[in-house]
Image: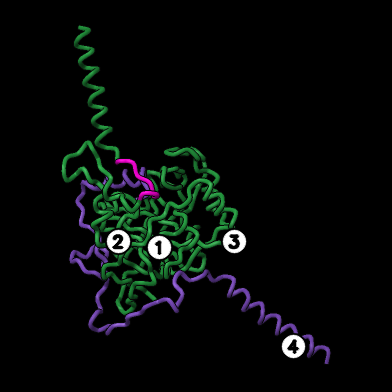
Chain colours: A purple, B green
Amino acid sequence: MLIKLFLAVSLSLSVASCFAESDGNKSKSLIDPSQQKRLSTDSSQQKQAAQPNASTKSTDSQSPQNSNQENKPSMIDFCRKNPC
Amino acid sequence: MNTKILRNLAFTIFTCYVTIAVSETPHWSHDEQSTWWAIQDTTQNVPLNYPFGECGIGKHQSPVDLASATIIDSKSLNKLAALYDTDTAPVFFNSGHGIQVNTSEDYSGVLMIGEESFPLIQFHFHEPSEHVVGGKSFPAELHYVHINEDGRIIVLAVAVDIGEENPVFGTILDNIPHEEGGQNASSGIQINPAELLPADLDPANLDYYTVAGSLTTPPCSEGVQWYLLPKVITISAAQLVQLKDIYTNNARAPQNLNGRSLLSTQ
């Protein structure tokens, strides 16, 4: 009887510690799910990889500036001297 | 002979003055951010005499309120990998606007977006956060700034909350010069920027939100692509106080989305 009781308590503690550990390792989320305005559109219509170098401008796509090679040293130098 | 020397000396001084006047950006501060666009550069003619005009007229400005944006999670997005290794000679820099760590010239850490590689140039902190959620800011925000060979800028942003002490952030605080423009290039300290990323995210395959935006400081140039991590990191309350002792309120207010949406991997 005592052995059964001991095993039951051990199992409970073990399960509890597992849950505690998994919670502790998780970082807080940036945006709470209740604050997210999601738009799940038809994936077949929008199945297009978002490229960081996309040349077309779009309000919801990734559209970095087109720059030429001359920007390289000056922009790197600028961002080392300024927050950017 | 003396006249010639004096003439050469005068020419040299004049050339130095013009070079400095042209290359230096006009002074600005976060206190006057609502009028950054109106700051004049008196060394330039119209329209270049308003070097920060984009801060006022830009339509894709950063930061933004993330809760105001529609999140699109149905698109297939590029894989994002922060392949940061240890920098053996980082430069701790007080930019006059915040605390910053410049990577060394031969640093090889990169952000991979799909197959494209963007070298990490520097990372810096804002207090409080610049991106907000439903009008609420986080205590601070970390920005990793990457620039590729084409001059394209990618910023990886991580919100900072109060919690457990952060040893890497502590090292940065302890080595940042307190005088504006001060640089500490010979600390002998090694930093791995990856150690500042959220511990429960895989650096080789990061989930993210992304939005087109701008630099959050003058000249507010657009064409910057922002990647925002969905998890936060922590620093202790004491570390936040230490950060505020050096810089406080160095965050730009949220800007109008103007129709932009957030793309999300999750």
State the quadrant of the N terminus of chain B: top left
To which chain does the residue with label 3 belong? Answer: B
* Position of residue B17 in the picture relative to residue B92 (left or right): left
In depth, the one of B168 and B1 nearer the eye is B1
What amino acid does circle 3 point to? Glu
State the quadrant of the C terminus of chain B: bottom left
Distance from the alpha carbon under mark 3 to that under mark 2: 31 Å
Residue at image x 42%, y 76%? A35
Q: Which residue is mark 4?
A: A8
Report helix, strand or loop for mark 1: loop
What amino acid does circle 2 point to? Gly
Residue at image x 22%, y 7%? B2
Q: Which mark is residue B213?
A: 2
In depth, the one of B255 and A1 nearer the eye is B255
| Above or below, A15 relative to B214 | below
Crowd around label 3: few <14 · some 14–19 · many ≥20 (10 Å): few
Q: Are marks 2 and 4 on the same chain?
A: no
Q: Residue furthest top?
A: B1
